[in-house]
């Protein structure tokens, strides 16, 4: 089980920077102190290294929900969804009206979409239709 390195500082720093940008203010515990993470659930969600995350509004997918569920941004903005589930649960981001649909995203996979047109775009997860979110482009 060498896949889970105890401390991946560069990745964690990126995650924390993005979380701060997204305004969620979450504490990615574990690697910033010298203490070891105490449980697997403390492992921070690692954002994908590709997919144009800088400048995107990040929506975390975890606990079978989109967080934040409501995103507002100006036209031309981008949203990056990242699957942060700690179990092996795959999700999608799929527009109700069909404007976009991601592939199945395994944990730590991401999907980015640019929103050029204004409007309110409701979306869901295909395997779990009860998971719902909205992107409002102003
Ligand atoms: Cu889902």
Image (tube, grey):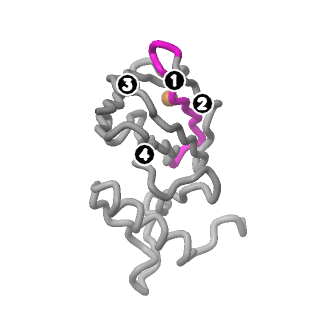
In-image side of 65 versus 113 (left or right): left
**Residue occupying the point 52% across, 44% down:** 83
Residue 7, percent from left and from top: 55, 76
Residue 131, percent from left and from top: 40, 25
- Secondary element under disc 1, as helix, strand or loop, is strand
Q: Which residue was labeled with disc 3?
A: 132
**Residue occupying the point 54% across, 56% down:** 47
Q: Residues within 10 Å of mark 3 (few under 14, many from 20)?
A: many
Give whichever of discs 4 and 3 has the lower sequence position.
4
Secondary structure mainly formed by the magenta segment: loop
Q: Which residue was labeled with disc 2?
A: 102
State the residue in front, 83 or 86: 83
Give whichever of discs 2 and 3 has the lower sequence position.
2
Judged by depth in the image, the label closer to the viewer, 2 or 3, is 2
**Residue occupying the point 49% across, 68% down:** 14
Region in magenta: 86-98
* Image quadrant in which the N terminus is located: bottom right
Give whichever of discs 1 and 2 has the lower sequence position.
1
Count the marks: how many?
A: 4
Structural distance between the alpha carbons of marks 3 and 1: 9 Å
Structural distance between the alpha carbons of marks 2 and 3: 14 Å
90 part of magenta stretch: yes
Structural distance between the alpha carbons of marks 4 and 3: 13 Å
Quarter occupied by residue 42: bottom left
Q: Residues within 10 Å of mark 2 (few under 14, many from 20)?
A: some
Give whichever of discs 3 and 1 has the lower sequence position.
1
């Amino acid at each position: 089980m060498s896949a889970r390195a105890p401390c991946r500082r560069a990745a964690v720093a990126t995650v924390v920077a993005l979380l701060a940008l997204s305004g969620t203010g979450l504490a990615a515990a574990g690697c910033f102190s010298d203490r070891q993470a105490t449980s697997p659930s403390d492992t921070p969600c690692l954002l994908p290294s590709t997919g144009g995350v800088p400048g995107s509004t990040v929506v975390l997918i975890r606990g079978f929900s989109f967080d934040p569920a409501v995103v507002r941004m100006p036209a031309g903005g981008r949203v990056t969804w990242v699957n942060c589930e700690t179990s092996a649960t795959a999700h999608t981001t799929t527009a109700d009206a069909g404007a976009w649909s991601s592939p199945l995203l395994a944990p730590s996979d991401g999907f980015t979409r640019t929103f050029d047109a204004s409007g309110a775009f409701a979306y869901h997860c295909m395997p779990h239709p009860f998971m719902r979110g909205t992107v409002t482009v102003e």
